[in-house]
Image (cartoon, coloured by chain):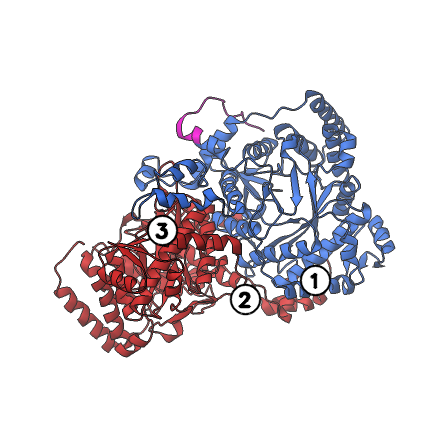
Chain colours: A blue, B red
Amino acid sequence: MSEPAPAREPRRGREARRSARAQRSAASVPYITRKIPITEILSAEGLEIIEHNADTLLQDVGIEFRDFPRALDLLRAAGCDIKESRVRFPRGLARKLCATAPAQYVQHARNPGRSVLIGGDAMVFAPNYGSPFVHDLEKGRRYGTLEDFQNFVKLAYLSPAIHHSGGTLCEPVDLPVNKRHLEMVYSHVKYSDKPFMGSVTKPERAEDSVRICELLFGEEFVQRNTVLTSLINANSPLVWDSTMLGAAEAYARNNQACIITPFILSGAMSPVTVAGTLTQVLAEVMAGTAFCQLTRPGAPVVFGTFVSTLSMQSGAPTFGTPEASLAIFGAAQLARRMNMPFRTGGSLSASKIPDAQAAYESAQTLAPTVLAGTNFVLHAAGWLEGGLTASYEKFVLDFDQLGAMHVLARGVDLSENGQGMEAFHQVEPGGHFLGCAHTQMNFETAFYRSSVADNNSVEQWQEEGAKDAAARANVLWKAMLADYQPPPLDPARDEAIRAFIDERKASMPDATY
Amino acid sequence: MSEPAPAREPRRGREARRSARAQRSAASVPYITRKIPITEILSAEGLEIIEHNADTLLQDVGIEFRDFPRALDLLRAAGCDIKESRVRFPRGLARKLCATAPAQYVQHARNPGRSVLIGGDAMVFAPNYGSPFVHDLEKGRRYGTLEDFQNFVKLAYLSPAIHHSGGTLCEPVDLPVNKRHLEMVYSHVKYSDKPFMGSVTKPERAEDSVRICELLFGEEFVQRNTVLTSLINANSPLVWDSTMLGAAEAYARNNQACIITPFILSGAMSPVTVAGTLTQVLAEVMAGTAFCQLTRPGAPVVFGTFVSTLSMQSGAPTFGTPEASLAIFGAAQLARRMNMPFRTGGSLSASKIPDAQAAYESAQTLAPTVLAGTNFVLHAAGWLEGGLTASYEKFVLDFDQLGAMHVLARGVDLSENGQGMEAFHQVEPGGHFLGCAHTQMNFETAFYRSSVADNNSVEQWQEEGAKDAAARANVLWKAMLADYQPPPLDPARDEAIRAFIDERKASMPDATY
């Protein structure tokens, strides 16, 4: 089922340098603190129209909370109008119920130096989530395994451009469905010391995720702090189902964070316009957040948005489109007016391979994601084929883009050194700055240094095999995995977690659901 | 030297549809009118620091105006301090001399429906400029020829996402250097009806470009209107040379537009910091613009900026880097404070082939270019290998990105139809919007439709040959060229222009400089 681990032999030359560079390509900060202004696309008037419409939608059409009576009880008591599973919010009520959600929170990592701030000026990058398939240049496309999952955890751990270990980096399809979450959470704990996400596929799997964290961090710490940020997707349009509500409830009750995310293919799961889609996003987020806050006031919630457009000819989802960019910018503005952290974007593409389409679409998702001031960026690396596939090569190609975003987010250095006026007194008109003292002083850190771009002459590039970016990335991820060393983990905690997992697994049949 | 033209036979099926789509993929507007706010990265305080420093630079170090006494005379008379070829501007003088440059101007095309506005909220896309080499997937990398040049003119003519025919789309290396400009300008006139650029490689070639326009538009029309926008690059750092000054003078004297552009590899030709580079950009632009305005007050000038970073290890230029993005944003802000149209950006990359590197770097150049509110975007399509190569495949891949930018720039539709509230009354929670009346009504124009992305299932993509984006682009550009029909050109004018060109050529030796 799994293949032998890559042989550990010392590598030399270019590969080793590339691997080393990929691991230090961005300043190793636990998260980005944005210094550049936010790009806003919608006017205040436009935002008010959408907010008004979302309130109208919540009041007139309402939201389904299906098969989850506890939610209906809470929402009825809070003043909602309930008919069967349909919940209608009198104008203004949903927003009011969301007001106890914190503007930002710290998600703790087992390595305190890796804890992340989520909200405000902070920006956190987390990798690809949820792909049943994986792809690399040699073995092509195939179902993901636990080994693939662990490889992606290790790669994300090694990249300073990634702040968060994420969640379902790929589906470990070689494990029974009902036991996967235990090994996924364990892999995050064991092979990384970055913060991670919990399971949401059943409420008891969310509880298992919390239990593992209690064994890792201590029970009291978990009740007082947030150690999990997990993904709760709406069943758009306008439905919250019992699986997601149950998982959200489990996390909120334990003071753990939920990313409340309308997952929308616009035109199929929402109106075919950006403003209509944003209206629905806001209504669904407010309803889901209201439920979390009624469950435990003050429980951290992230305003999530995933909007893809459709090919109206084939019905296929499309990525990196201008309408998706506008939705990213607009949703970020709506979230800020809710005073909530915001999640969207990533490095999204419909391409099947890490080619020019993958890169154009990813970059045209990532650029608005960053400029919109997104706080939590899921799918920041590795995503291909509309999320069906996690690509090894794209994983490290995207790392490089994320590293560049660290520098962009710092903005323009206006210190005396940054102004660089002394350089003009060191270099005559018509001269060159390469050797001047100011350049020499800033040589090492002057410009972002890509780990995968080839900037050499065409002759040198040809001599080195005329590799495209994907082929270079193939060399790089293998070199990184060969270099991987696990972060230390307290053996007693490791053993306690393993014992819990083995006991849980022993109590379960092998189920495929 | 040239190969047979592609056979004109009717094509069927997917290729024909892709070709047709590429030719209508963006609304066919003569230029973009931006409806979204501009992204600003620098604070007013930061801009003032850079402006102050630029004035200090102009006053203390000054700018070389080499081998061009007429410039020195004009600048001396205007109050500059001249020592040999060094021109120092008392603080504030340069900006004052630039004040007569218009905030925007119309560049007329021979087809009046294709005339472009340059400045303000207008955004104009022009293709790749200046590459000695061309590349396509079958024939690889080779020197450009006149046939290649004409092919690129035709492709740019066919793409509704490109507004401007550009200038030296590639170098027609099969022609003697001293005669190239005549055939290049003629090719723009003959094979396109979009506006174009004139020659700048010698002052008399600029004059030739103006003469051809006089034969095309009429002498009086040219004196009263702008029909050429041409590229005048500084010899950075802080030098204007006689070739560029002579060409700029020829254009300004004829009321034709100059893009005054510091062409800077930061770290070599400017300080290694963004703020230092922006200071130099501003100083060089102000000095060049002042000269144009002294030559003919009111002559249109575009504030140009081309900033690439360097690999500080190899000295190779790098593209799509975060520092280049910051320079794009910052220079756009400086230009707006000069009340001048702004040129920068494009779809730039150091990659040798249209792979993921090419696409990431291009998109990370194009996104800031558009969001910064750039008015004239040169190198918007086709650029590879740091500009050394014009790529056929990348040309059409970039068209697609430019088409998407048209939609992004329109912003969010907040009309009643755009708000889409009626859709929520047509679809129940949990239902889907694909068939509802609101979707049906907006079906055709709802989402930007890419001409090169493959959004199909992996199975269908494999059935169709598992082509990457570059391979699909290869099919597309050949289909477009096969479909090409020239725009009508008045035979009398055509004949007059040809006669002028043939006479000029007959008077010249075949020179290689």
Label 3, label 2: how many angstroms apart (C-alpha)?
56 Å
Residue at 48 percent of width and 52 percent of height: B49
- Most common SS among magenta residues: loop
Vertical side of A473 occupied by B355: above or below: below
Both marks 3 and 2 on one chain: yes
Q: Residue B167, percent across and down?
A: 31, 61
* Marks 1/3: CA–CA distance: 55 Å
For residue B513, which numbered disc appears in the image? none
Q: Residues within 10 Å of mark 1 (few under 14, many from 20)?
A: many
Q: Nearer the viewer, mark 1 or mark 3?
A: 3
Q: Amino acid at mark 3?
A: Asp
Q: Which residues are magenta?
A: A1-17
Q: Nearer the viewer, mark 3 or mark 2?
A: 3
Which residue corresponds to mark 1? A51
- Tell me if residue B117 comes above or below residue B509 in the rendering: below
Q: Amino acid at mark 2?
A: Thr
Q: Is residue B468 visible?
A: no
